[in-house]
Amino acid sequence: MELGPVQKMWVKSLKAHPERQLCGQLGVKERFGYKACCLGELLICFNKHNQWETSWDDSFLSEPGGSIFGLRDLYKDIGLRSPTGLLDHPVIFKSAYRNTLANMNDEGDTWPEIAEFVLKNPELVFTKSV
């Protein structure tokens, strides 16, 4: 499977901006930007690609509760299996069990590591190119 333009934009952003990584929440506005989990960054890339304005007051970047609030309606459009980024099957990554992108992000895997995993295993992460 080849990654689509949104997915490629996301992988590039994960590699370029590891300082934005946030754990335990989809994303939060900061004084000069934002922090997000890898799924929050995917949602931002999806919005940018579709030329939707990202509002930092929207629930997808401010509600507590992680990825489900922001992705519950859009995850299929982005090519994910679930709002938490369920993998096609569980994997051992960096000597640890992983079954979702949220789990990877929140259990210590860096954005660049997640990006490399996605590049090597797009079919485990996505159901379609977007």
Image (tube, rainbow, N blue to C red):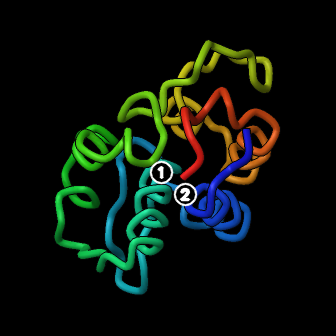
Cα separation, mark 2 vs mark 1, equals 5 Å
Is 2 positioned to the left or the right of 35 in the image? Answer: right
* x and y, in percent, of residue 13 in the image: 64, 67
Q: Nearer the viewer, residue 127 or 9?
A: 127
Quadrant of the frame with the N terminus: top right
Figure label count: 2
* x and y, in percent, of residue 67 in the image: 34, 42
Q: Secondary structure at mark 1?
A: loop
* x and y, in percent, of residue 59 in the image: 17, 58
At label 1, which amino acid type do we have?
A: Cys
Q: Nearer the viewer, residue 127 or 71?
A: 127
The image quadrant that residue 43 belongs to is: bottom left
At label 2, which amino acid type do we have?
A: Gln
Q: Kindly check if marks 2 and 1 are in contact, taking CB atoms under 8 A apart as contact.
A: yes
Q: Nearer the viewer, residue 25 or 76?
A: 76
Location of mark 2 (residue): 21
What is the number of the mark on residue 37?
Answer: 1
Callout 1: few (<14), some (14-19), or many (20+) C-alpha neighbours within 10 Å? many
Is 56 positioned to the left or the right of 125 in the image? Answer: left
